[in-house]
Amino acid sequence: MAQRAWLLDASIYIFRAWFSLPERWHNGDGIPLNAVYGYAGFLCELLSRVQPAPHLAAAFDESLGSCFRNELYPDYKASRALPDDALAFQLQSCRELTELCGIPCYGSERYEADDYLASLARLAKAKQLPVTVITRDKDLGQLLSEPDDAWWDFAAGKTVDIEQFEQRFGVRPQQFADYLGLVGDSVDDIPGVPGIGPRTAVGLLAQFGTLEAIAEDLQAVARLPLRGASRLPEKLSTYWPQAMLSRQLARLEDKVPGLDRLPEYALSGEHIDAVVDFLQSLGLGGPLVRRWQKLAAGLQHS
């Protein structure tokens, strides 16, 4: 397998397990472990698929309500509830599990996982390495900048490249923040411009390319073959500061302070032994542990 940087958006797969699996597994204190069980199985399968992976890193979302974007817009992600104690325990356990694998892990109260992944992608590009971002989050499509880059939803078995991203959203990856500046994003409480939907945003960006170019010739917007085009200049003028703010919120920060080196990675049998011990300490044995032991056996014969 050709060298590339594998960048894991870990939290999104933890939450996927939390929401999709029943609470069949508990630790000795009765805390549910469904997210740990599902994430541990996912991580084992991922590692078996990408070995050897000399550049693999994971990022975690730990900044809900405290991100620098909340200083720009206090309502950013305001509709999301903070994790309760049971989920917080599982989130921490999943990060510990990832660290026991030896995978470099990133997360903080100020920067989101997406910002760490964007920074790692920038460092990979400096080494002329293609990037695969492992995620279900459309926002990370912004990291696709070269033909060999990929957005990989591992759980769904879906891989998207630059061309497929543009086919799906109608804009290029580098235009996606501008696109969200217009349409907003209800998932992240990004407001956008009221009354501008995906089709109109795609039409505007196809014609002008960027928000700045739209602002330079608002009267030309009225002549576009778009539904309600005659009303768009007034709407855009009224909500222009909100559009620019929304784009700022949607853009990924690719220069997280202190992150100035692309880490190296190599999975070892010792890492897997530590993972097995950790899972068993939580009371998670049986088939899950055997999957990790099978992965260790594969390493010995590779």
Image (cartoon, rainbow, N blue to C red):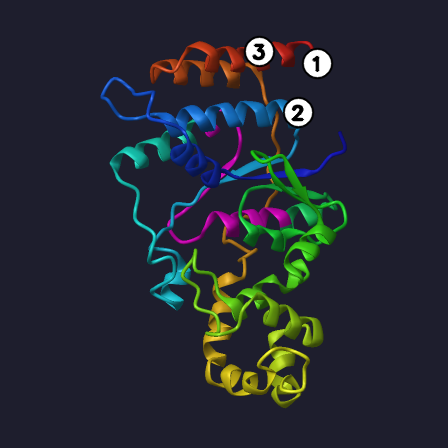
Question: Which span is picked out in magenta?
Answer: 98-121
The residue wearing badge 1 is: 302
* Callout 3 amino acid: Lys
Magenta-colored stretch includes residue 129: no
The residue wearing badge 2 is: 51
The x and y percentages for residue 28 are 25, 17
**Of helix, strand and loop, which one carries label 2?**
loop
- N-terminal-most mark, 2 or 3: 2
Whether residues under marks 1 and 3 lie with C-beta atoms below 8 angstroms apart, the answer is no
Q: Badge 1: how crowded within 10 Å, few (<14), some, or many (20+)?
A: few
The residue wearing badge 3 is: 294
Whether residues under marks 1 and 2 lie with C-beta atoms below 8 angstroms apart, the answer is yes
In the image, residue 116 above or below residue 22: below
Closer to the camera in the image, 250 or 278 = 250
Taking 44 as reference, is 280 left or right?
left
Q: Badge 2: how crowded within 10 Å, few (<14), some, or many (20+)?
A: some
Instruction: List the single residue furthest toward the left.
Output: 29
* Callout 1 amino acid: Ser
